Image (cartoon, coloured by chain):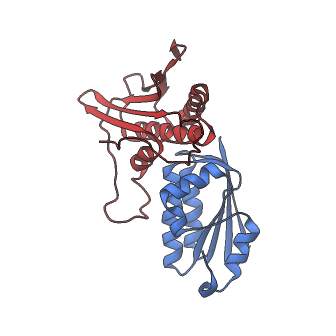
Amino acid sequence: MSYYLTESGVDADTTTIVVGGELDTRAAPALREALERASDAGVTHVIVDLTDTTFIDSTAIGALLWASKQVGEAAGELQVVCTNRNVLGIFEIAGLDHFIRVSQTHEEALQAAAMPAELRVR
Amino acid sequence: MTAVSSREREVWLAAEAGGLAETRRLADEAAASYGLEESERFAFTFAVNEAVSNAIEHGAPSPEGTIRIRFSEEGDKLVFCVQDYGEFAPRTPLHDQRAARGRGLAFMAAMVDELDLCRGAAGTVVRLSKRRTPSGFASANGRRSSRRPA
């Protein structure tokens, strides 16, 4: 398997999904299912940590955008953690950074999640 | 796998998602051999992955359950072709910019210099090509230098 995925609850309102490796069409269903579980659970903050992700394709991008919309419609926020410049380049082309906050570290994402919604600046 | 020449490589790939990792490895090798710098290697590999993913998901394999992929250097271009035996079915979202599907073709076009799609009774061929960035000019991911796909 060329990817891994783990889910963990940070607190009652925050879930972190860590995904590493190469996110192609084999990985996208697992990512989508994890995002659906978080959305269905009514978690307010979903952090998708892509620190160790080295490749992402359009299906994974689509899953992130879908989840961002679902969580947002429930008054929550989905964030992404990523520092891989190639993956960030894909985000820019996809316009994903217009819809989803991208942080450099998980800690930075947690700090943003802890801020009142009206004070969060993307 | 068939090495047609030192500058060409043709592979009959099993039409399943399990072959994508190998496809990306071959794409990266071809791009490195051709002399693309890192961000352009990634862009090329990304486009190849999208094209092959689409062929696997929406195309039809040969009677042997394969699709054909080919890397070649043609003049000043690194060229990739994927051929399946079905009908290309791009799914472009009509109104929802955050739709979960249908952006692969747009991604491919953004990552390469030329993109051609040829649909016929026998199947579909997707051909994409990328040129080296002239020395002295930094290349951002997705910057394209020539015509848009038809």
Determine which quarter of the picture holds residue A8.
Answer: bottom right
Front residue of A15 and A49: A49
In the displayed structure, B126 sits above or below B103; it is above
Front residue of B139 and A104: B139
Q: State the blue chain.
A: A
Q: Is residue A11 visible?
A: no
In the displayed structure, B65 sits above or below A24; it is above
Number of numbered tags placed on the structure image:
0
In the displayed structure, A67 sits above or below A14; it is above
Q: Can residue B83 be seen in this view?
A: yes
Determine which quarter of the picture holds residue A32.
Answer: bottom right
Residue extending farthest to the right is: A107
Residue extending farthest to the left is: B121
In the displayed structure, B95 sits above or below A21; it is below
At x 53%, y 33%, the residue is B132
At x 74%, y 64%, the residue is A105
Position of B92 with respect to B144 (left or right) is left
Q: At which x and y percent is residue A1?
A: 65, 40
Position of A23 with respect to B73 (left or right) is right
Q: At which x and y percent is residue A30?
A: 58, 53
At x 57%, y 28%, the residue is B26
Chain B rendered in what hue?
red
Residue extending farthest to the top is: B5
Q: At which x and y percent is residue A34?
A: 60, 61
At x 29%, y 42%, the residue is B150
Q: At which x and y percent is residue B77?
A: 46, 28
Front residue of B125 and A5: B125
